[in-house]
Amino acid sequence: MITIDEVSEIDRMIHQQKLDVRTITMGISLLDCADPDLDRLCHNIYRRITTKAAHLVEVGEEISRDYGIPIVNKRITVTPIALVAGAACHSTDDWVRVARTLDEAAAHVGVNLIGGFGALVHKAMTDADRGLIEALPKALSQTQNVCSSVNVGSTRTGINMDAVALIGRMVKKLAWLTRDNDSYGCVKFVAFCNAPDDNPFMAGGFHGVSEGDTVINVGVSGPGVVSRALDMARGKSFDVLAETVRRTAFKITRVGRLVGMEAARRLGVPFGILDLSLAPTPAIGDSVGEVLEKMGLSQVGAPGTTAALALLNDQVKKGGLMASGSVGGLSGAFIPVSEDSRMIDAAADGGLRIEKLEAMTAVCSVGLDMIAVPGSTSAQTISGMIADEAAIGMINGKTTAVRVIPVEGKDVGDTAEFGGLMGHAPIMPVSTASCADFVARGGRIPAPVHSFKN
């Protein structure tokens, strides 16, 4: 039960400290939509989504109004499409048609984004998986709200380097096809290692094959709340700092749990998980970088940044687990460069480089996220970046990802403008040393010895 004091505190967090529920995401299984006839497949997908999610946006707005809690996005995730459409899709145009069907369904119900146009290829690729990946440039450049993810590795299986090499080439094609909009298409794609089945955040959200027919997952954010709380812990020990973050995460989680349970009740859908991820926005005061700097760093990227992020990520998870038994997804801290004002500043003046960001990904919730690089960056270099991140995830048994944008026509010193929550990003330098021969080997990087636990 929430007390009057907690209500007052929640009100302050919302109105003064930028607390919001970042997304209510409905997961929808499309497994029984499969059909070898493309027309019937698209009809089944459209009908399933528009029926199941018919009231999602309406309910989200009602809850926001009734409780005074901002709910920024309403989203949908679906079963990875490669598992559903393989029998019906025989060409790139077929896969693009399925992507357009998803886009039309999303527009009909009024959601912000729909995720799941992707594949699970962490051990090998089927013909359907390969067909979908090869269709990604056209599919994502010709749709508005469709997001895609491909899981290329796991701790149990290793890293599928054939898929990694193919994805590097597809990212370059996607960047070119959306070159008139700062290669925005790449914002809607992410390559994963150890992708979770229940992630409500985009672009990596999809409805896992182990999930039920439908589910409601909630993603809650609150770096501004944590930042304000740390004002009370200035100069104090790490023990006090950790306790402050943990208590604050507990309070944020309570808000998200309330929204998730209420949304599930009103929609008549099971409540899945609450993803407590400190997801920043470009707004001043809503920055994970600011939180790290309040721990005593002069700037994100300074020595100590990785340790500070490790503390933050761990205490956020601990606070969330104390507040709800349904914490899942990614949960922790995101470090997307384009969406965080302090990260943007640090990257722009050279204090934060890709190499430091890669080190930070070993202890945070995801990986190299929303990184804008020169348009001249090669496909092999992008594949190498994906392989590096996948290796961190594979060896450490954690989720890692890469969402990199090679911005056509721009170079270091320029800025890419993505707009809205996606913000803007300085073009960051990338090593020009070649990894082409490494990527060209193909095959699979084996799983680590500690993956064998039977």
Image (tube, rainbow, N blue to C red):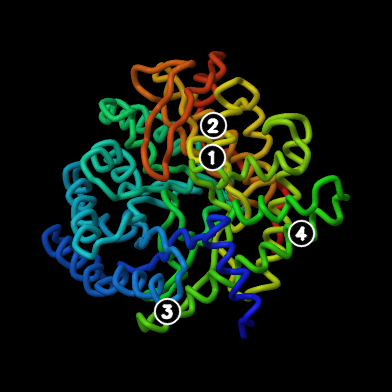
Q: Secondary structure at mark 4?
A: helix
Mark 3 nearby-residue class (10 Å; few <14, some 14–19, many ≥20): many
Comparing labels 4 and 3, the label whose residue is closer to the camera: 4
* Label 1 environment density (alpha carbons within 10 Å; few <14, some 14–19, many ≥20): many
- In the picture of the structure, the residue carrying the numbered disc 4 is 244
Secondary structure found at label 1: loop
Crowding at dot 2, Cα within 10 Å, few <14 / some 14-19 / many 20+, comes out as: many
Instruction: Place residue 47 in its image quadrant.
Output: bottom left
Q: Is 352 placed left or right of 46 in the picture?
A: right
Residue 74, compared with residue 405, is above or below; it is: below
- Residue for badge 3: 264
- Distance from Cα at disc 2 to Cα at disc 3: 36 Å
Amino acid type assigned to the residue bearing label 4 in the image: Thr
Q: What distance separates the C-alpha of mark 4 from that of mark 2? A: 26 Å
Tag 3, which secondary structure?
Answer: helix
Which x, y percent locates residue 280? 53, 47
Question: Horizontal and vertical percent for residue 192?
Answer: 50, 46
Q: Which residue is mark 2?
A: 344
Spatial CA distance of label 4 from label 3 is: 31 Å
Indicate which disc, 4 or 2, sits on the residue closer to the N terminus: 4
Q: How many marks?
A: 4
Q: Position of residue 52 (x, y in %)?
A: 28, 74
**Disc 3 to disc 1: CB gap under 8 Å:** no
Residue at 32 percent across and 47 percent down: it is 127
Residue 340 bears which disc, if any?
1
Which residue type does callout 3 highlight? Ala
Give the residue at x 14% y 65%: 43
Closer-to-camera residue (178/381): 178
Callouts 4 and 2 close, C-beta under 8 Å = no
| Mark nearer the N terminus (1 vs 4) | 4
Q: Residue 57 sits in which quadrant?
A: bottom left
- Residue toward you, 278 or 396: 278
